Image (tube, rainbow, N blue to C red):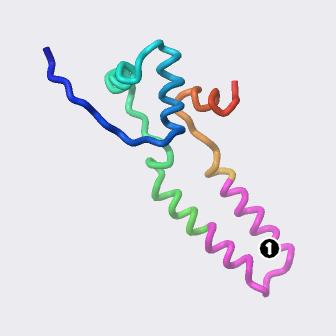
C-alpha cells in the first residue's frame, strides 16, 4: 500500500465554493476530487501568470497616460481621447479567460 500524507491548505472562500461545486458535479469528496485533478488534468497556466510582464508594462502605460491626460496643456478633446484609449486597454486586459465553464455557472451564467 502506498504511503499517505495529510495535506493542509489555505484557500479563499471563493475557491472552496468552486471546489465544492465541481466535486459535487462528479459525486466526489474533496480529497477524491483533488486527487482526480492532480492526476487527470492538463497543465493550464492562467493568462495573468503567463502574460505577467505584458500586464505590468500595460499597467505602466496606463499610469503614464493618466498623468499625461491630467496635464493642463491638453484640450478637453485630447483628454477624452486618452481616457477612451485607457478604457480600451482596460477592456482588452479585463476579458476573463477561464479554464472551465464552472466559473460562469457560479457567476450566474449559462
In this rendering, the answer to whether 108 lies above or below 90 is: above
Estimate how packed mark 1 is, as few (under 14), some (14 to 19) or many (20 or more) residues with alpha carbons within 10 Å.
Answer: some
Q: Quadrant of residue 36?
A: top left
Q: Which residue is pictured at 51% across the width and 18% down the height? A: 24
- Residue extending farthest right: 76
Residue 26, horizontal then vertical, whole percent: 48, 14
Drawn side of residue 40 relative to residue 93, left or right: left
What is the chief secondary structure element of the magenta stretch?
helix
Residue 59, horizontal then vertical, whole percent: 57, 64
Q: Secondary structure at mark 1?
A: helix
For disc 1, the marked residue is 79
Give the total of numbered labels. Answer: 1
Q: Quadrant of residue 11?
A: top left
Decide which of 18, 85 is in the foreground and name it: 18
- Residue extending farthest bottom: 73
Drawn side of residue 105 relative to residue 57, left or right: right
Q: Which residue is pictured at 31% across the width and 37% down the height? A: 8
Residue 56, horizontal then vertical, whole percent: 51, 62
In this rendering, the answer to whether 95 lies above or below 61 is: above
Decide which of 64, 28 is in the foreground and name it: 28
Q: Tell me which segment is drawn in magenta.
A: 62-90
Drawn side of residue 33 relative to residue 6, left or right: right
Q: Which residue is pictured at 50% across the width and 25% down the height? A: 20
In this rendering, the answer to whether 95 lies above or below 101 is: below
Q: Is residue 88 magenta?
A: yes
Q: Quarter of the image containing the N terminus?
A: top left
Residue 72, horizontal then vertical, whole percent: 78, 86
Q: Is residue 39 magenta?
A: no
Q: Which residue is pictured at 79% across the width and 82% down the height? A: 74
Q: Quadrant of residue 101?
A: top right
Q: Quarter of the image containing the C terminus?
A: top right
Amino acid at each position: 500500500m502506498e504511503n499517505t500524507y495529510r495535506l493542509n491548505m489555505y484557500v479563499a472562500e471563493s475557491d472552496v465554493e468552486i471546489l465544492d461545486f465541481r466535486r459535487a458535479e462528479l459525486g466526489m469528496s474533496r480529497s477524491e476530487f483533488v486527487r482526480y485533478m492532480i492526476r487527470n488534468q492538463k497543465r493550464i497556466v492562467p493568462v495573468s501568470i503567463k502574460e505577467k510582464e505584458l500586464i505590468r508594462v500595460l499597467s505602466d502605460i496606463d499610469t503614464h497616460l493618466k498623468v499625461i491626460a491630467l496635464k493642463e496643456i491638453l484640450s478637453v478633446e485630447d483628454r477624452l481621447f486618452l481616457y477612451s484609449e485607457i478604457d480600451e486597454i482596460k477592456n482588452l486586459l479585463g476579458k476573463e479567460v477561464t479554464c472551465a465553464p464552472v466559473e460562469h455557472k457560479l457567476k450566474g451564467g449559462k
